[in-house]
Amino acid sequence: MSAQPLKVHESLDAYKRQIPFFNYPALFKQHEEDYLRIFKDVCGRGAYILQKDLAQFEENLKKFLNVKYAFGCSDGTNAIMIGLMALGVKPGDEIICSSHTYIATASAGQMLGAKAVPCDIGPDNMMCPKDVEKRITPKTKVIMPTQLNGRCCDMDALQAIADKHGILIAEDAAQALGAKYKGKCAGTMGKFGTFSFYPAKVLGCFGDGGAIVTNDDEIGQKLLALRDHGRDETGMVVMWGTNARLDNLQAAFLDFKLKGYPAEMERRRAIARMYNDAFKGMPQLTLPPGPDADPNRYDIYQNYELAADRRDELRVFLKDRGIGSIMQWAGTPVHKFPKLGFNTSIPGVDKFFERCLMIPMNMTLTDDDVQFIIKSIKEFYAQ
Ligand SMILES: *Cc1c(COP(=O)(O)O)cnc(C)c1O
């Protein structure tokens, strides 16, 4: 496809931009001075492992989430793994997760010898409670909903199923820091909840980072030890553990970013509102629920994920205009990796992945960028 000829009065800028799917350097530039100041401060004190900046970030994270315990972790995946260890997950146990999730949700339990059981999604692309219930066996130990794209699953329905069958719920809230369901924050509704501070996440650091939270005293004590070689507050080894600590330097950056985060959630919701308002009524697109669609939820749009007719052609069209787009998990849900021993079809997920697409949703987008993306998508379907 060749570029359209320029009209005389139009600048190049009128039909082509540089809007990458995610712009790491631009994000750094937004607060470069602050980051350099924090770097100098922390390194000047030589404060690298389990220092006051980490403790302070954990305090602020607890307040932000209204939860009893919060521990910074090396990343979101290890956070899930130590959480499952604290629950006593053992070989042979089964853990039900959505197939529309990052492989980490499924792999954390597998690494402990448990079996991941991927399930289907409902119309809002979240874990489908009805399908979860169908997959329960006597071996099922944990249901692990993914609070996908910054939205919470139907936690009441999932909790009712868990209670009925005597199963635990643990949340993979890697994408949902600050998202709410009936006034409760994602990550605080199950036995434990985990977060990721991967650089492209809603609250990202400069490398790997994560956290685990719980309201349960016994699990809280275990997590404290599991993350730091089995040591308690006094440094005594009280159980077997591992090293899954968040770097103090990353914690200092995150504590700074957390202060500005409430405004960022609102900005993400505003962008989602612009997209939803512009695209509603277009038969070619299936949109995510809008920010004002459900008074019981506060979605924070880690991603803006929709389903689009002629998805692959649309992506090429957008790329020609300088607009980045991606398919979540590079287009492959958990149950589609044959080397992992899966050989099933999960109809709702399979159908969604034929059309799934994520368009830019991040803190470096201007309103003008958003309008250009909207205009471009409309022009694609008008041609
Ligand atoms: C990012 C992510 C993780 C893993 O987080 P890491 O910090 O990269 O280990 C787990 N689950 C979901 C749903 C994610 O999006």
Image (spheres, helix red, strand yellow):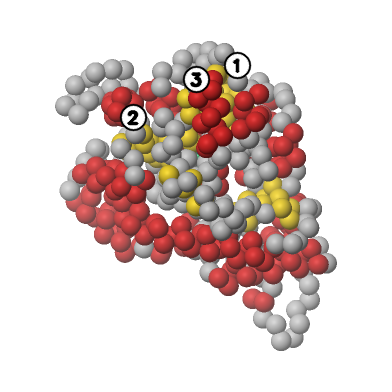
- Residue located beneath label 3 in the image: 166
Few, some or many C-alpha atoms within 10 Å of disc 3 (few <14, some 14-19, many ≥20)?
few
Q: Is residue 335 above or below residue 27?
A: above
Q: Which residue is drawn at 81% across and 67% down?
A: 382
Q: Is residue 296 left or right of residue 358?
A: left
Please, which residue is most extreme toward the bottom here?
9
- Residue located beneath label 1 in the image: 137
Q: Nearer the viewer, mark 1 or mark 3?
A: 3
Q: Distance between the residues labelled 2 and 1?
A: 26 Å
Q: Which residue is drawn at 40% across and 58% down?
A: 262
Label annotation for residue 216: 2
**Image spot of residue 369 (x, y percent):** 59, 69
Per the image, label 3 sits on a secondary structure element best described as: loop
Q: Is residue 357 visible?
A: yes
Few, some or many C-alpha atoms within 10 Å of disc 2 (few <14, some 14-19, many ≥20)?
some
Q: Can residue 22 be seen in this view?
A: no
Q: Is residue 304 left or right of residue 76?
A: right
Q: Residue at x 72, y 23 (%)?
A: 343
**Image spot of residue 268 (x, y percent):** 51, 59
Q: Distance between the residues labelled 3 and 2?
A: 17 Å
Q: Which amino acid does label 3 sit on?
A: Gly
Q: Earlier in the sequence, mark 2 or mark 1?
A: 1
Q: What residue type is labelled 1?
A: Thr
Q: Is residue 346 left or right of residue 299?
A: right
Q: Nearer the viewer, mark 3 or mark 2?
A: 3
Q: In which quarter of the image is residue 276?
A: bottom right
Q: Which amino acid does label 2 sit on?
A: Asp
Q: Distance between the residues labelled 1 and 3?
A: 11 Å
Per the image, label 1 sits on a secondary structure element best described as: loop
For the N terminus, the quadrant is bottom right
